[in-house]
Image (cartoon, rainbow, N blue to C red):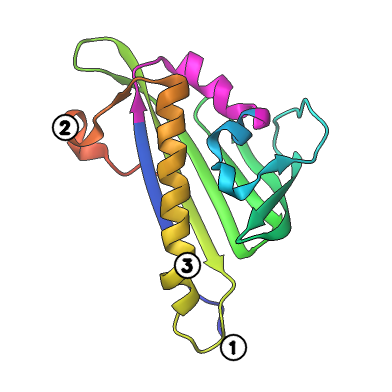
């Protein structure tokens, strides 16, 4: 049986802060709790502080629709201050590979800013022969909701955010490093 084709979720946000202020926030796994919606009851189980580096393992606990789940990721690539990738080792997906990118930009008023990109390749667990029904009805809408919350929190904690469509129309989708 052929492997399912991964789905792709891509988002980006431009912040009116320089890369040197933005990247340290994202490379600290402890800040992930602040970016994760409260309805997931997300908790990092790995003792902190966690040294961010290629090969680092991070264990989490979430509640998905009331069900407790354990999740383990490995930092499979780490290139500060431009990117890192966390890859699920154990968790709710058959595949979860999250590329985080960080790119310095010049804002229209000349100030330094940072474009933060997320590119997630994922394969959800699904009912065989359902044609992706679980993905369409539950997984993608929930991921969209989670990343919307994430952007709201990023803007609140690191803002202000810049209107990407108005100010950076050619780069609304991050390009993998």
Main SS of the magenta part reads helix
* Residue 26 appears in the rendering: yes
Give the residue pinned by disc 2.
166
Where residue 25 appears, as percent x and y from the top left, is 56, 23
Q: Nearer the viewer, residue 128 or 171?
A: 128
Which image quarter is the C terminus in? top left
Task: Say whether disc 2 or disc 3 marks the residue closer to the N-terminus.
Answer: 3
Q: Tell me which residue sits at (41%, 71%) in the image.
A: 136
- Residue 72 lies left or right of residue 125; in this view the side is right
SS at badge 3: helix
Please give the label number shown on residue 1.
1
Task: Say whether disc 1 or disc 2 marks the residue closer to the N-terminus.
Answer: 1
Task: Say whether disc 1 or disc 3 marks the residue closer to the N-terminus.
Answer: 1
Q: Tell me which residue sits at (44%, 62%) in the image.
A: 140
Q: Nearer the viewer, residue 134 or 66?
A: 66
Q: Nearer the viewer, residue 22 or 141?
A: 141
Is the residue marked by circle 2 packed among few (<14), some (14-19), or many (20+) residues within 10 Å?
few
**On screen, residue 169 above or below 132:** above
**Which residue occupies the extreme right position in the image?**
47
**On screen, residue 113 above or below 67:** above
Where residue 135 appears, as percent x and y from the top left, is 47, 71
Residue stretch in magenta: 14-30
- Residue 20 lies left or right of residue 11; in this view the side is right
Q: Nearer the viewer, residue 172 or 61?
A: 61
The total number of labels drawn is 3
Is the residue marked by circle 1 packed among few (<14), some (14-19), or many (20+) residues within 10 Å?
few
Instruction: Give the Cα separation between the discs numbered 1 and 2.
Output: 45 Å
Q: Tell me which residue sits at (49%, 52%) in the image.
A: 120
Please give the label number shown on residue 138.
3
- Residue 107 lies left or right of residue 140; in this view the side is left
């Amino acid at each position: 049986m052929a492997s399912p084709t991964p789905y792709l979720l891509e988002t980006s946000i431009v912040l009116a802060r320089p890369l040197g202020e933005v990247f340290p926030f994202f490379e600290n796994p402890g800040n992930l709790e602040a970016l994760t919606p409260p309805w997931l009851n997300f908790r990092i189980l790995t003792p902190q502080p966690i040294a961010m580096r290629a090969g680092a393992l991070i264990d989490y606990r979430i509640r998905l629709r009331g069900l407790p789940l354990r999740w383990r990721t490995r930092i499979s690539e780490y290139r500060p201050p431009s990117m890192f990738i966390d890859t699920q080792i154990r968790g709710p997906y058959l595949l979860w590979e999250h590329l985080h990118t960080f790119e310095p930009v010049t804002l229209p008023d000349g100030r330094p800013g940072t474009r933060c990109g997320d590119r997630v390749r994922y394969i959800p667990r699904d009912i065989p022969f359902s044609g992706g029904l679980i993905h369409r009805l539950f997984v993608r809408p929930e991921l969209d909701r989670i990343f919307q919350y994430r952007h709201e929190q990023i803007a609140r904690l690191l803002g202000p955010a810049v209107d990407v469509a108005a100010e950076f129309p050619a780069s609304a989708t991050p390009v993998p490093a």
